[in-house]
Structures are given as C-alpha cells and as structure tokens.
Amino acid sequence: MSVKAAEDPKEALQALWPRLQAMAIEPVRDEADFVERRAFQDTAFLAQWAVRGLSLKPNDVVPGWDEHFGALVRENSRASNALEKSKSVESALERKRLEYALASQPLVLPPPETAIRNFGVEVPLTPVHHAPVHSTKYARLKMSEVLMRFVATQRSQGIDGRVESEVAPIVNFVISLLDDPVMLDINGDHLLTIKREVAEIPLPKGFGQDERSLYFRWSTAKQNGWVRRRDEKTVQLKRVSQTTLDGKYAPGLTAFWKFAIEHSFAYGPVPSFEFGTKLNRPAAERDAYNEEEVLTFFGAAPFTGCKSIAHCWNEGPWYIQGYFFWANLIELLGGMRPSEIAQLRCRDILDFRGEPHFRYAPFAPEETEKQRFDPQPGGTRGKTSSAYRWIAIHRLLLKLGIVEHRDAIVDAYRTARIKEAGGAGRLSEEQLAAIEDEAYEQWLFPDWKVYVRPKTEQIMWSHVLTKACTYGLKRLKIHRPGLSNYSARHAFKGMIDDIQGLSERSRKVIFGHSTKTNVSDGYGPKVITEQQAKIVQQLTNRTIWRLAKLLLRAKRKAERGELQVVEAWKADKRARDERLQRVLAKRAEQYQ
C-alpha cells in the first residue's frame, strides 16, 4: 500500500503489521529477497514516521511494533554486509573452492543463514527450496492459557493465593470481553476496548453470591441498564470506584501483562492501564480521627462497659478487654497496622533497652540470627521489610494492663499443659522448657477470629476488625468521609508529626515505612532509638489526656467490682478454626 497516500497513518501501520511480523522472524535468503525486505523497511519507516507526527508512538498503535521493526533492521543490515562481502575476490575464490569440493563428495548443505553469512549466497548455487522457518521465541497462546501459567507460576513462587482473588477476576473479565484472544494478536483497538469497558463494571451490590463475576455484572448493566430488580426490590447499580480501578484492576492487569511479555506470550511494552470516567466515584483518601471522634469512638461501650461480647455496642456491666479493645488502642497509640497487630504473639512483648516494646518480626528472637545465615520460609508476614520493627508500648497501654493480659494467656497455657502431664514433678527440665516456649508462642489475641478465603486460602488478618469498626462508626453516627479502621493509625501519625525535633526518617522508622527513598535515607539506625522510644511511650496531648481519663476510670470501676471483668481471650477462635490451622500449617506461617 502507499503510506504517503493513506488517509490515516494509524491504519497504514496496522496494514503493514502482519507483513512485518512475518519478515522479522525470517532470515534473508538471497539478493532478491534482500531487495524486497529493504523496500518494505523503507515503507514501514515512513509509516511509523507519520504516526510519530501525530504525537503517538508506534507501540501505542500496534503493540510489539518497535521490537519487530528493530529485528527487521538488524537482519537487513547483516545481510547487506554479507552481500558486500560476497562481491570481493576472496569470497569468489572461496566459492570456487567449495564448487570443486562439492564435485568430489556427496552434497551436504549448510543451513541457509550460515551460508549467507560465510559466502554471501546460499549453496549450492542452484535454487533450493527450503522448509519454512518458524520462530520459537513467541508462543501463540490464548489469554486463558497464559492466565493458567501465570497463576501456577505465582503459586510456585509463594504461598499466598492473592493472585487468584485480586488478579484473576479482572483478567477473566478481559478474557470474556475479548472472547479469549491470542495475546500476540491483541492490538490497539483491543486495548481501547479494555480501557473503556473496565470502568463500566458495577459494584457487587444488587447481585447474588452466584452472580459476582465481573463480566456478569458488566453484561447485566449493559443489557438491562443500571437499575435492577432483585428479590422484589429495585436496586440502583453503581460503577466501581476510582480506588478499585487504580488500586486493584490496573495493578492486576499490569502484573499479568508483564508476565506475558517476559515469557514471550505477548509483545511489549506493558500497556498503560488508566481507567476511569466522571461516573466512577473518586478515590476517597483516608483521614485521621479528630479529637471529638477519638473520644466518641474510644469512649463507647466496648471500651467502658458493655452488655456482652455479642452486644458490645450496648452499654452494660461487662468490662471486656478483648481483641477489639486492644487492637484499636494499639493502632491509635503505637501506629501499628491492623494486620500487624493480628499476628502478634505473647513472646512479642519484650523489654528493649530497658523499656517494654512490641516486637514485630518474621521469626522468634532466638531464630532471628539463624535466619540471617540459613533463611527458611514461613514466619510472620509484613507489608514490606520495613514493617518489621520494634514498637514502643505507650504508657497508657501499660496502665490498662497489656502486659498482664499477655501473662494471663501464658500462665493459663503453662498450667494446662503441666496438668495434662500429671504435674511438674513428672516432667524433665527440657520438657518444662519446651512448654514454656510453647506458652509464649500463643497468640496475643486468640479471640480475634481470622477470615480465610475458601478458594484461595488467603489469610485476611484484619478483615473482622475492619467490619467491626465500620459497624461501630455507623452505630455511633460518625459519618465523616475518609474515616475507617485505619483512621486510628492516621491519628497517631498526626500526633508524632506535631512533635518538634523528630526527623522525617525517625517518623518512617516508627511507622514501619521504608527509609530508602534516596541514598542518604538508607543510612542510619534500622531499629527504634532510645529517644524515639521515649517519645512514643510518653506521647501526650489533650486528646490522649482526655482519653486516658475515660479508659482508666472504666478500669478502676472493674477493679472495684462495679463492672464485671470478662476474660475474652479464653474464647479462643483460632485454635478451633480448622481452616485457619490447616492454612497456617500448609503455609508455614507460624514461627519456625
């Protein structure tokens, strides 16, 4: 076709693409073939030049163009050098010697590309028909086949089924949307379709458990509109939020495409998956509790006296220091992530430089040094390596009895095991020491139920706490946008930001954020310093002072018998959870 005469340069590039794909993987066979390839190279160059004139990159129009065009140019350059060499006197002598040698022995043909490289022509000099050469670099697999390999690879490299719950759904949506195409055939129109339709996926509200696939929700809205009748009720469907598009769908497709390109199932580079329209709800930034919200939330029944564990938001005579009580306070006064608090064990309350700390680390203290030289799988999971740290325990948490809470769990386990054995007199020192170690291996919050996704076996450490906090905020009519379970951690960040003389790097260490944003920040202590620890332990302001009065007043009532103390930790919801125990054993999540 005439590129110059083409009305749309993008159409010209797309028209040349099949021919470029074929030529890029074939070697030059002879001089006539070389002339044809050079002519095509010049035509393709004009086409991509015209596309660049539209401020577009050829790869944006035809994914994989740059790689194939580069291969064509390299092969043509090699053939050009070989043909120049074939016109020399030395090459003519070499060919004549070969003719004499072939006349006196059976004909043995070298590969055509070797002959071209060495002699400038294929040998013998008579036309020879060769079998077509097929590229082995790229594999023509359907997207569903690539997804199977992607999931299997991720499973073999790790122990988390997150890829099946977070990546596979959006990839399966694209598979259904495009009718499971061969990934090498995906072009710019396909990518535009993906970017347009992903933003049109409705939220799960209004669909049953068997109707939750992304494609089913999308096709329902496309065919029947955004109002749906279900269970004799009218449901207004809503599009997924920008948070879901940017935080879940885009990273999922990017990871999948990167895998496909890396293993030659698709042409590079990775497309830019930017989704969203004005109809998608904007991303809501998390916000911190203000003073009145802190006092309202932490002054409610779960912290000052409630009706029962099941009815903890109703005021009553029970004083329950369960997982909900401790997790929210540790998040507010220590800045730990909810998932980190959920994984704490009794042995993770330790003295560090003479002061009590939470130790959030992959392995038990005695295993840490061994792991440096003999790494093993398993251990506590952290968001990043920077999450593993010492967290100073605030004075208010100590006054409320967090250490006594730990000791009660350890003593109960120790006593039960010794009683099972028939008394301490029947046990050796080694057996008693083993029981002591096991006692400190117990969860610090055993009443904290952990949700495990059935299909993927992904452990959702903070799922139950998040739902409980969301319910509490609604119950207390705290409706300000941006508030969530994480608001306590954000409030802690605001408190330490107000401290004079504390560097930004120190704040990152305290918070479990990476300090390696630049070369300079990579230097310095990797654990909390004495100064940082004292700042956290003694952190105070008007909000904390007013909060302490509320909480300590309730604790004194319990000590005087005005409130009935309930030891919530005795309701162990983890030891009896067969699914959790099976997954923990399978994934070696427990300390080694």
Image (cartoon, rainbow, N blue to C red):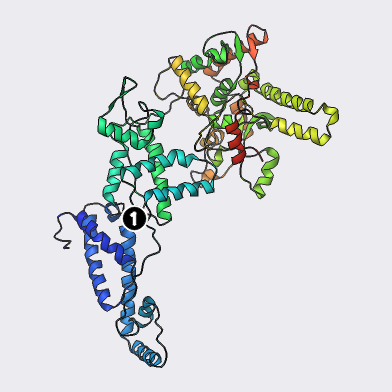
Tell me the quadrant of the picture where the N terminus can be found.
bottom left
- x and y, in percent, of residue 38 in the image: 25, 71
- Report the number of numbered marks: 1
The quarter of the displayed image where residue 438 is located = top right
Tell me the quadrant of the picture where the C terminus can be found.
top right
- Mark 1 residue crowding within 10 angstroms, few (<14) / some (14–19) / many (20+): many
- x and y, in percent, of residue 479 in the image: 40, 18
Q: Label 1's element?
A: helix
Looking at the image, residue 142 sits to the left or right of residue 592; the answer is: left
Q: Is residue 500 above or below residue 255?
A: above
63, 148: nearer the viewer: 148
Residue in the picture at 29% in, 78% down: 30
- x and y, in percent, of residue 262 in the image: 43, 55
Q: Which residue is mark 1?
A: 184
Residue 527 in view of the camera: no
- x and y, in percent, of residue 229 in the image: 30, 23
Residue in the picture at 33% in, 64% down: 70
Residue 469 in view of the camera: yes
Q: Is residue 252 above or below residue 67?
A: above
- Type of amino acid under label 1: Leu
The quarter of the displayed image where residue 434 is located = top right
Q: Residue furthest top?
A: 562
Q: Is residue 64 above or below residue 306?
A: below
224, 318: nearer the viewer: 224
Q: Is residue 239 above or below residue 41?
A: above
